[in-house]
Amino acid sequence: MTVLPAVACHVTAGGTRVYTVTLRAFPHFQANSFLVVQGEPTAPSYVALVDMGSAHEDSLGDLQAGLAHIYSEYGEMWAWDTLSRLVVTHPHPDHVGGLPAVRALTPAPVAAHTWAVSALEQPESRGAAWQDQVEGHLRWAGIPTESSYAGRLRRRAHTLMLPSRVAVQTPLQDGDLLDGVFQVIHTPGHDGAQVCLRMDDLLLSADHLLPHSSPPLMPERSQRGAGLQHYLDSLNRIEALEGVEVALGGHGGPMADWRGRVRELRARYQDKLAAVQAAAQQPVTIYDLLLALYPNLRPAQAILLLDQTAALAEYLGQQGGLKETQREDGAALFQT
């Protein structure tokens, strides 16, 4: 028996229907896609698809099944050939990997933050850029060049690439009102090109604000707009929004107490920063910090936690909480 993906509907104060479709983006890892509908269900005046999941076969199948369920069970008579818009919140493979397959089904124009355009239109160049910087990153972080960590970082350049090129018709900037529907809020940190989208009293918070986890962070030196300073600044921007009653993230369920979640995330990062400082009483590399903070590290966690540790140490260096010096081989050394 076919198991349908989970579908939920939220209606904004202005009557816009927002359907969440939960996809199997990767094995044991789910992500959300959103169908946004305005007008009468039998003749919608505007229909947008926000995020498309991964290129994984299960993800694409779940997307098709979920959207078909919205048509048959909710009576929303949308169609691929009349879709109004495709919107990318940020160019990560679990949210945009399915874009080329979806693009083949619809002529709807694509919108993404202006910093994401090159990643979508020239994915090979993005992969090459990652590859070019990886050896310098290994040296800076003090990672042994023949270690399994180094191998995973080298391979990541290919996993971050879009399967094929997709043109972006509408580059977005902070403050834009896309199609008269979405208030665009640039929220760098998790990704420099990430945007949140507000509709009336509802916020699509992408991976900036999630109900059960803190979003993975890279150091700013690895990507424009990444890093903890940008993330915390973006939390402040979101918290300042008035009139938002619910937030829907790129993973997990709805957040009614989303302001409480913002406070939890701030406190969580303060705890993480304190742990890094405690582990840096003597000069240590990012790699040393990783092993000290996570002595029972599992391989599946390694790269994300390595990125996070680098982002935390970088932030403390920027704020004066750690002093950064350089070892003879080029590795950064951090100490309180």
Image (spheres, rainbow, N blue to C red):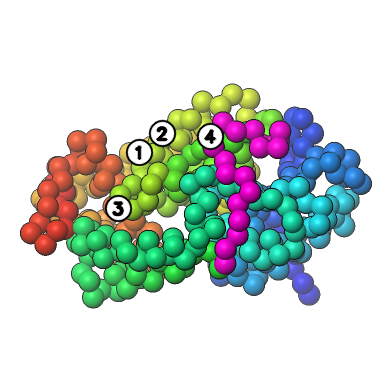
Q: Are marks 2 and 3 in contact (CB under 8 Å)?
A: no
Q: Is residue 300 left or right of residue 5?
A: left
Q: CA distance from mark 2 to mark 3?
A: 19 Å
Marks 1,2: beta carbons within 8 A:
yes
Task: Say if the magenta span includes residue 173.
Answer: yes
Between 271 and 309, the residue placed more toward the observer is: 309
65 shown above or below 115: below
Q: Which residue is identified by label 3?
A: 309
Residue 302 in view, yes or no: no
**Residue 126 x %, y %:** 44, 60
Which disc number belongs to residue 233?
2
What range of the chain is rendered magenta? Answer: 164-182
Q: Which residue is mark 1?
A: 229
The residue that appears at 78% across and 51% down in the rendered structure is: 83
Is residue 102 visible in the rendered structure shown here?
Answer: yes
For marks 2 and 3, the one nearer the N-term is 2
Residue ID for mark 4? 174
